[in-house]
């Protein structure tokens, strides 16, 4: 097994737990490419041990999810390649995804489909953000041990009960028979991880791909007319119908988001027209517009048809610092409901013939 000489201690090179997990799961080339892309703090890269901690598993999962996102977002992939070529790395700030607070078959309803994983990984609820215009609620989750170093999650729930009766019926038809990617074995490992705060390497290797599978779509092909019905009332629910619980976007923490936006606009990339600024003035965000993706539906005769619909996107954020008691400054890890509502608009579009 090839070991890239990235860490040196006590006269020898070593592979960290995170690298070992990802090499065993994805191969060496994929792993080194992931580490070339994403900055990982030294405390997470100690020598291999018999057990894998919550934080190490959380970082490994985030690297898998980030890689999946940029493969689906060409503008994001091009930006990341530019960063690497300039000798830099991405500071992965947070990933965002959407859920539905509604009966979903075997899949736990709403955010619980995701937070059962986050809790086991050592994440804690960090804030609640009413997204009233979208009829949604957003919640942020930060890692308890490494809140600034390990990417947060922004998990939103859509509330179908706030929409029309016909909308609610369409939601049930689309997601009402969703599958749960976690087996009883996986659920047991999540409980063990939450209790013991670590797993053996073999156990972690079983659980990691199952956790990754939670961030996907868990229902099958459905009628185009139901998609159009959902889209008429909620672009966000229409997006969930085609993309499920996949990352809606991944976010790069940058020093100067305005400068990044100007540079990307000069390159002709589909960057948002304005930068969103939080009420505090400390959190500033912008994003590329969503990539278009082809998805399958059925028509009135039950035949499969394809449409081009909004997929995921790549976001940028700058965070200021908060003055704490005693003069200490900490990074502002909060979000802003107004910013989030505006950023959600990156996936608003009508389907077109593919």
Image (tube, rainbow, N blue to C red):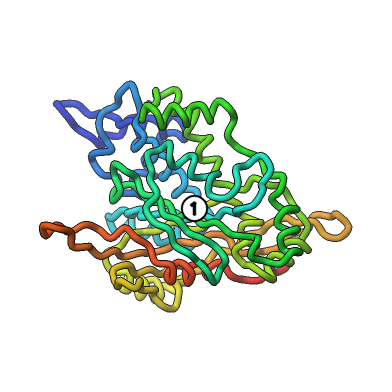
- Say which residue appears at 28% left-offset and 38% top-offset: 44
Q: Up-down: is 46 above or below 34?
A: above
Q: Residue furthest left?
A: 326
Q: Which residue is identified by label 1?
A: 69
Q: Nearer the viewer, residue 297 or 329?
A: 329
The percent coordinates of residue 295 (x first, y second) are: 68, 57
User: Above or below — where is 304 with respect to 291?
Assistant: above
Residue toward you, 149 or 234: 234
How many residues crowd mark 1 within 10 Å: few (<14), some (14–19), many (20+)?
many
* Image position of 88 (left or right of 226): left
Q: Residue at x 35, y 64 (%)?
A: 317
Q: Position of residue 39 (x, y in %)?
A: 30, 48
User: Looking at the picture, does residue 61 appear above or below residue 129?
Assistant: above
Q: Secondary structure at mark 1?
A: helix
Quadrant holding the C terminus = bottom right
Horizontal side, residue 104 vs residue 126: left or right: right
Q: Quadrant of residue 197?
A: top left
Q: Residue furthest right?
A: 301
State the residue in front, 78 or 59. 59
User: Residue 262 at what x, y percent from top left?
Assistant: 35, 75
Q: Position of residue 68 (x, y in %)?
A: 50, 48
Q: Residue at x 66, y 56 (%)?
A: 241
């Amino acid at each position: 097994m090839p070991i890239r000489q990235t860490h040196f201690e006590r006269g020898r090179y070593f592979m960290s737990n995170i690298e070992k997990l990802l090499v065993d799961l994805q191969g060496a080339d994929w792993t080194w490419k992931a580490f070339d892309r994403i900055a990982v703090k030294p405390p997470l890269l100690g020598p291999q041990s018999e057990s894998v901690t919550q934080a190490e598993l959380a970082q490994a999962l985030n690297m898998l999810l980030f890689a999946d996102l940029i493969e689906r977002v060409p503008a994001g992939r091009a930006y990341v390649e530019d960063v690497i070529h300039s000798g830099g790395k991405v500071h992965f700030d947070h990933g965002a995804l959407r859920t539905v607070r509604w009966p979903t078959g075997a899949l736990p309803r709403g955010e619980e489909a995701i937070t059962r994983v986050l809790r086991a990984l050592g994440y804690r609820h960090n804030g609640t953000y009413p997204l009233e215009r979208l009829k949604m609620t957003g919640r942020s989750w930060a890692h308890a041990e490494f809140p600034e170093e390990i990417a947060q999650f922004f998990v939103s729930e859509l509330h179908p009960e706030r929409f029309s009766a016909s909308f609610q019926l369409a939601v049930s038809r689309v997601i009402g028979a969703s599958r749960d990617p976690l087996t009883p074995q996986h659920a047991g490992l999540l409980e063990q991880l939450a209790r013991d705060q670590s797993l053996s390497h073999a156990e972690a290797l079983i659980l990691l791909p199952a956790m990754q599978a939670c961030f996907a779509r868990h229902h099958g092909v459905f009628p185009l007319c139901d998609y159009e019905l959902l889209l008429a009332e909620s672009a966000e629910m229409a997006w969930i119908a085609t993309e499920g619980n996949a990352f809606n976007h991944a976010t790069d923490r940058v020093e100067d988001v305005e400068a990044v936006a100007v540079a990307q606009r000069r390159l002709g990339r589909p960057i948002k027209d304005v930068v969103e600024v939080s009420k505090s003035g400390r959190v500033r965000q912008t994003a590329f517009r969503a990539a278009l993706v082809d998805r399958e539906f059925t028509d009135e005769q039950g035949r499969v048809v394809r449409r081009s619909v909004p997929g995921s996107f790549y976001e940028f954020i700058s965070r200021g610092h908060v003055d704490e008691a005693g003069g200490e400054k900490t990074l502002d890890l909060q979000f802003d409901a107004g910013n989030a509502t505006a950023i959600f608009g990156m996936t608003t579009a009508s389907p077109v013939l593919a």
